Image: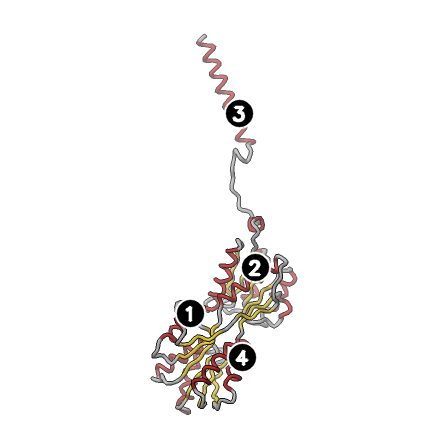
Amino acid sequence: MKKKNILLILMTLFAVCFISGCKQNVGTPEDNAVVEETENDEDETGGHVYGFSGADLSDPFYEVLKESVSSMVEEEESRMLVRDAGGDPGLQNTQIQELIHEGVEAVFLCPADPVAVTPALEALHEADIPVINLYVRTESADLAKAFIGADDYNAGKVCGEDLISRQPEGGSLVIVDRPESPAINERITGFEEAVAGGGFEVERIDVGDDYGLIAGQLKAVMREKPQIKAIMCGDDHMAKQVLDTLKEEDRDDILVYSVGGSPEIKNALADLSSPMTGVGAVSPINMGKTAAKTAAAILEGGVYEQETYTETFYISKENVNMYGTDGWQ
């Protein structure tokens, strides 16, 4: 009897081992669970794959714009591949080709050069990948599905209106300009039309590609015309150079205006001893949100505007605390 029991137990153990061995070889997914990451996970959740081609992400404006787009993309459970051209148009063309090979469905484009980026735009068009052109319009505008910019004309205009209210008698005025920049052209045009007929005598400083020349040129103008009433700057980088020069020359009696609204310039506005007077504020945060919504509408067959200009507004010493000084608006 004992031998029979032992034999029965051994046969049972053999059967269990045999069955277990078979399950390891031909087991079902439930038996052998494996988590896999596939390239179309985003599609299965309703998300998209975007590309972001930045002109130069060392510029805080473009960095905030990129972050604004990215946060909206994440909210829709999509993802975004980011490339930074670092101001190099040739590199930007190469990076956009990389994004095409990565299989992006749409590209947010801040051109390092509105003309030199044309080959990349043509490649995107050939690949049937829509482009959302941000802030600086490309020369080949017809190759972009949408353009998201800012009302630069109004940003300059509100500065001019404030100057007229503070200096109704006119006087000597310096404009720090960069004519080859379409955005700065719009700002200065808005400003000049606002002060037209206000009795201002205008001196111009053309910075070209070298903002480091501002200090020397401004000092020369101040020596020739010491009674300068105001300085209008095409962007915040210019304004920073101007403020540094005025501090060096111990001139806090000149009204300084700019377009942008960077934290550095808003901090100068908050300083009551600073000659910084006002800024026509541009919002990279609102621009990024609008761009992300537009891209989603394009990919999903929704309604979108082919051209959108986000609102610009005036920030002064009186209301700067409403907008904060530790970030962009």
Cα–Cα gap, marks 3 and 2: 50 Å
Q: Nearer the viewer, residue 324 or 18?
A: 324
Tell me the mark number nearer the camera, choosing from 3 and 4.
4
Find out whether the residues at labels 3 and 4 contact each other: C-beta distance under 8 Å.
no
Task: Identify the residue at horizontal 58%, vertical 62% (top origin).
Answer: 294
Determine the CA span between mark 4 and mark 2: 32 Å
Residue 101, percent from left and from top: 59, 57
In this rendering, the label closer to the viewer, 4 or 1: 1
Disc 2 vs disc 1: which is toward the camera?
Answer: 1
Q: Position of residue 209 (x, y in %)?
A: 49, 78
Tell whether 144 sits left or right of 84. Answer: right
Q: Residues within 10 Å of mark 3 (few under 14, many from 20)?
A: few
Name the element at disc 1. Answer: helix
Who's the residue at 44% across and 83% down the image?
231
Please, what secondary structure does the residue beneath circle 2 have? helix
Q: CA separation, marks 2 and 1?
A: 36 Å
Q: Amino acid at mark 1?
A: Tyr
Kindly check if marks 4 and 1 are in contact, taking CB atoms under 8 A apart as contact.
no
- The circle on residue 185 is 4
Report the quarter where the N terminus lies: top left
- The amino acid pointed to by label 4 is Asn
- The residue that appears at 53% across and 43% down in the rendered structure is 36
Which label was assigned to residue 99?
2
Q: Which mark is residue 323?
A: 1
Q: Which mark is residue 19?
A: 3
Q: Nearer the viewer, residue 194 or 104?
A: 194
In front: mark 4 or mark 2?
4
Residue 76 in the image: state x and y as whole percent.
Answer: 53, 55
Residue 259, label in figure: none
